[in-house]
Image: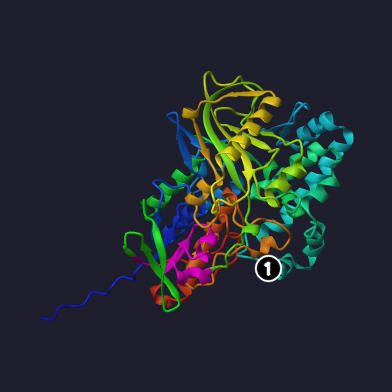
Amino acid sequence: MPVQRQPSLPRRDRVVVVGAGIGGLVAALELAHRGADVTLLERAGEPGGKMRRVAVAGRWLDAGPTVFTMRWVFDGLCDDLGLRLDDHLALKPLSVLARHAWDGDGHFDLHADVARAADAIGDFAGADAARGYRDFVRRGRDIYRTLEGPFLRSSRPTPVSLAWRCGLAGLPGLLRISPFARLWHELGRHFADPRLRQLFGRYATYCGASPFHAPATLMLVAHVEQEGVWTVGGGMHELARTLAALAQRAGATLRYGCDVARIRVDGGRARGVVLADGEAIDADAVVFNGDAAALGAGLLGDDARRATAPVPRAQRSLSALTWNLVARTAGFPLLRHTVFFSPDYAAEFDDLTHRRRLPRAPTVYVCAHDRGDDGDPPPVGAERLLCLVNAPADGDLAPLPDEELASCEARTFRLLAQCGLQVQREPASTQITTPSDFHRLFPGTGGALYGQASHGWRASFTRPGSASRLPGLYLAGGSTHPGPGVPMAALSGRLAAQRVLGDLSRSRPASSATWPRAATPGGMSTR
């Protein structure tokens, strides 16, 4: 009697995700949930990418992003996957967004609540400044509402597609957001006090740009912050660990300590990857969550060069020089987030963007991991601190000379002391990260932490989208659209996943579909 042939089950599409940063983790989670056979490869020993942590004096410190914003991005992801964010992360909102200090001028707290912030600004800089702040807030809200749907949630918009998606009714709003103006100039229309202009000009550095060259549309950050800034229980790295666990639960395979040497290309299409040890992993699609500049530089093989254009050094975003330390502090009343401003902002950014050197008079950001926003007494004993100054992204050149690093360190902690903060540092309890270190951690970047600099109105439209120039290769992460930052990287992961789902479903006969029709964040069908 002949053996009856059993019908074969449809093969699940195989997707390799390279890099376990936030964009890669979100892409892997969504793809696995939708039924793909996902393998996530990360060369480090744990997830996170730039959301990394370091051990100093036996204690863990966040060494990357320190704030959680745009919670709706992660709530939306969890809702779509049948999850609740609060079941997986302990989030606590901050009522004071940051404390700001200037040598000799005391300090000023920016509140999340607009009314409290306006009153505080009035006390700090006068009634005109308070009125200017309210006008500034309205503009930030209008910019955000104009751009959220047609830009942030859209797959690589162009100026034409942005105008089309806004429609005739939305064009007046699009024109009102000052798309061609520079941030520093527009801030001058709201604030005569140079300290407030400095404070809100700092929004440009959130995407590694100079306030003197960044577009005025970055005023939308004010609205983002007012919508909520949270701390994450266990540190920001806990977000990466949580996403990794959820991806594994959804069926993704996560492999750490795997260095991808090249994207394998066959027939003009990405077909998988080859690891540094020679292992080949086949795939129907590859999502690259490293910096897109690494592809253009040929670091993932010559065949993958054409996936995206290289980023010239002059167009890189800022890097940083950081100190992660465990130390005793005294004097200045730190909050969770404190910014100590340079006495000469213009000179600081001239050093960074034109002279391409560590600033002679740096602005210093301090994250006090063990504090909140309530002004409670400092922790007993030594506390965990991240201190950061901006630096040019030239980490692929010769390392910064020891004397230049020492000089910048002296200037940095001298400014803190002048503002009243004494930090008792010990070399054994300090870990320094330079642009060269960031370049080693994130190859192809020169140490740039935010991809291409957001300078000029065109920059927002020149970031690579989720579909690269190489068929079968998709992009996610802060160097791609919609831009840098934790929630933006998460959005990029969703956009990449949905583009993969749509492309693979179109290439497959209808009878062999293995997942339901997908929709991109924002509701636009991929089919």
Picture coordinates of residue 286, whole percent (x, y) = 44, 65
- On screen, 53 above or below 292? above
Relative to 187, is 291 on the left or the right?
Answer: left
Image quadrant assignment for residue 109: top right
Give me the residue at 42% from left, 29% from top: 58
Circle 1 Cα neighbour tier, 10 Å, few/some/many (<14 / 14–19 / ≥20): some
Picture coordinates of residue 165, whole percent (x, y) = 70, 67
Picture coordinates of residue 13, whole percent (x, y) = 39, 68
Q: Is residue 518 visible?
A: no
Q: Nearer the viewer, residue 144 or 375?
A: 375
Q: Residue furthest right?
A: 128
Image quadrant assignment for residue 522: bottom right
Quarter placement of the C terminus: bottom right
State yes or no: residue 361 in magenta.
no
Picture coordinates of residue 264, whole percent (x, y) = 40, 69
Q: Which residue is mark 1?
A: 158
Quarter placement of the N terminus: bottom left
- Which residues, given as a range, are shown in magenta? 281-307
- Give, as a three-letter code, the residue at label 1: Thr
State yes or no: residue 295 in magenta.
yes
Relative to 263, is 71 on the left or the right?
Answer: right
Q: Nearer the viewer, residue 412 or 448?
A: 412
How was this image coloured?
Answer: rainbow
